[in-house]
Amino acid sequence: MNIYAIIPARGGSKGVPGKNVKDLCGKPLIAWTIEAAKKVPGISRVIVNTDDAEIARVACAWGAEVFDRPKALAQDLTLDLPVFEHHLAALHAKGELPDMVVDVRATAPLRRSARIAEGIALLKKLGRGGADSVRAVSSAGKHPYKMWRLAGEYIEPFLSEEHTGMKEPYNAARQLLPAVYQNNGCMNAFWPEIVLEKKSMTGSKIAGYVMEEWESVNIDTPLDFMISEELMKKHKEKFI
């Protein structure tokens, strides 16, 4: 099976300017993801999709291919789907469309090659009939049953009792609430036709791949950089 890893990495980050090439424990942030993807035996190509010349330069220096993204697809509100539609259509036009695509984000540096390989193995096992995609998740940091919306001067539960089936779940012990998971941005594996034909990044049958909370940090702020550095030091044997 021919599998490509695609790393979407646009320039112009507002939260942490230049974050994709910012140093993290001695390497540019994006280098951790490039190296992890290159270590996965089943992945034949690692491609960084970017609009930024500096990200492209660093990506090449760390052994990735670069696909030039149009500036029109690198805006603050640009969704993932048009970015991947554009990239996969270009591969298809050249007769280079892979059997499977793995979307790995540079902002999730604590995700290692073994995790990418496990996600791929799960989608392979399920096959096209069993799942459209595999998405990595981790336990949610905040439970949605305890969240609120503003209603004028008051607050009201974000989820109604009709939805939760519980009276005042926001006052309940967390242990009594159902387990809930959130996307962690570490990996999303899918068949190319899910993007090109179903016009979706996941399709309707999404297999969940649960990862530990400590390895699910997604870098959006300077604090996330600090947390990632400390976790890499704590688990340094995993990041040699």
Image (cartoon, rainbow, N blue to C red):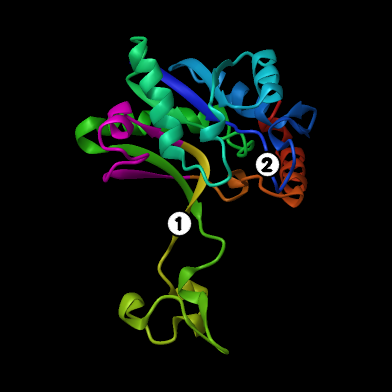
Horizontal side of 34 relative to 121 (left or right) equals right
Residue shown at 65%/26% (left/top)? 52
Label 1 belongs to which residue?
A: 181
Label 2 belongs to which residue?
A: 13
Q: Position of residue 46 (x, y in %)?
A: 52, 18
Residue type (three-letter) at the residue carrying disc 2: Ser
Q: Is residue 35 above or below residue 22?
A: above
Q: Is residue 207 magenta?
A: yes
Which of the pair 198/104 is nearer the observer?
198
Horizontal side of 76 relative to 178 (left or right) equals right
Residue shown at 68%/22% (left/top)? 53
Report the mark closest to the observer, 2 or 1.
Answer: 2
Q: Is residue 116 magenta?
A: no
User: In the figure, residue 19 lies in which quadrant?
Assistant: top right
Q: Position of residue 11 (x, y in %)?
A: 65, 33
Quarter of the image that includes the N terminus: top left
Residue shown at 27%/44% (left/top)? 205
Question: Who comes first in sequence, dot 2 or dot 1?
Answer: 2
Quarter of the image that includes the C terminus: top right
> What's the mark number on residue 234?
none
Outermost residue toward the front in this view: 72
- Label total for image: 2
Give the secondary structure at mark 1.
strand
Horizontal side of 121 relative to 72 (left or right) equals left
Residue shown at 78%/33% (left/top)? 25
Q: Start and end of the magenta stretch? A: 188-210
